[in-house]
Amino acid sequence: MNSSVVVGLQWGDEGKGKVSYLLSRGADAVVRFQGGANAGHTVVLDGRRLKFNILPAGSASGARPVIGAGCIVDVERLEGELSMLQSIGVQARPLISRFAGVVLSLHKDLDGSLEALRGKAIGTTRMGIGPAYADKCLRIGLRVGDLSRKAVLAEKLRLIGKFHNLPTGEDFERLSEAGGRLAQFVGDTTSYLVGLLKGGGRVVFEGAQGALLDLDYGTYPYVTSSHTLAGAASIGSGVPHTMLGDVVGVMKAYTTRVGGGPFPTEIDGGLAEIIRSSGAEYGTTTGRPRRVGWLDIPALRYACMLNGVSWLAVTKLDVLSNIDEVKVCVRYLCDGVEYESLAGLEDLSGARPVYEVFKGWRADASEWSEAVKGGWDMLPSNAREYLGFVEKMLGVGIGLVSVGEPVGYEVFKEDRYA
């Protein structure tokens, strides 16, 4: 197959942007198939930090960015990211599905109001994505193809405003003008992608958030508002599932989470702050500090099953450097019952982690640089033991290990992944 689906295996923030960029080099197109500006994908090139919310981060490689029908579009952020690509010499010509949803100002207001009503906040980014998806399901949502049709735009805004009892007048001129500017990029994304793949072109599908935030299979209600699994690549892009190739599961060497929700392996105190500081664990979209914890095998085993992962990409291995002991949760204990997978465990908040402990590894920036140059066998021996254990426990091979943020600091285990 000449396509790859890149998905996160944890609660988001796994480093999908960098992995997508690496795999998109030489690709014809890179596709966002779900989510909206609640995503935060980062690529660090030549010392410059490129932050993507709606365009796929892989488009920094020069692959054509495609936004599928499964996405929710924030038009201002989209135009800002196109300008960012131009500033690094990438003249992107995106293709946006006419069926993709559009976020309105009132959706962002509703996002904040819903958080206040819940009492116990979920931790939404307040980008309006959930309410925009809700309107889509109610069949009153605004779509990208509506923006260039003023009469349709006005009528849909009237209906949405009436339903929510909120004003939408300020959105009309803003969206109508944006619709005129973006009209050249709007079209039939499905036919384009299917034709590209049939013709031997290469396509990367870039997911957002992570498997444990999936609307149906994640830790509900502490989830996102879309389907984050590899299967969503087909529905969100319109490309038949039979045309999808390998599934690349991206995971950190430890675990993080933003916002509320259960987190069995969470740690706090000084060690948590060391990991958070070393890994720059602050939200790309919101800047919020991320919760941090040890690697969680039962959760990863569940995520690998849901996604049918072909191979793993492990990021931020260097963050665990210079820690004497590194822990890995191998199973949960809940009400006297042991669970080796998150599957079947209805209430994760009651799960207690059972750990195996590994000797840490010592390495500074220069040593990691040498390891990257030397390849897999030059990684610290204790780190290789740690990675080997992960492979054994998950039953999936590791194809890529990334250290640090800049592109160029990664080790491909096999040539076919490079």
Image (cartoon, rainbow, N blue to C red):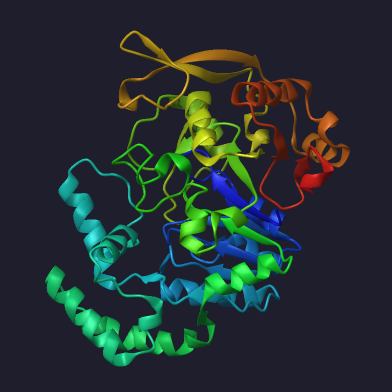
Residue 40 appears anywhere in the view: no
Quick check: 72 left or right of 273? left
- Quarter-wise, where is residue 376 in the image? top right
Q: Which residue is at the front of the view, 95 or 318?
A: 95
Quick check: 184 left or right of 291? right
Quick check: 39 left or right of 364? left
- Quarter-wise, where is residue 203 in the image? bottom right
Vertical placement of 335 versus 142: above or below? above
Residue 189 image position (x, y, % from top left): 53, 73
Residue 37 image position (x, y, % from top left): 43, 62
Quick check: 238 left or right of 153? right
Vertical placement of 298 versus 14: above or below? above
Residue 275 appears anywhere in the view: yes
Vertical placement of 25 versus 178: above or below? above
Residue 29 image position (x, y, % from top left): 65, 67
Q: Which residue is at the front of the view, 388 or 403?
A: 388
For the point 30% across and 11% down, the residue is 335
Seen from this angle, which residue lies furthest right? Answer: 374
For the point 56% across and 31% down, the residue is 254
For the point 44% across and 52% down, the residue is 287
For the point 41% across and 86% down, the residue is 179
Q: Which residue is at the front of the view, 69 or 277?
A: 69
Vertical placement of 144 versus 263: above or below? below
Residue 257 image position (x, y, % from top left): 43, 39
Give the number of marks. 0
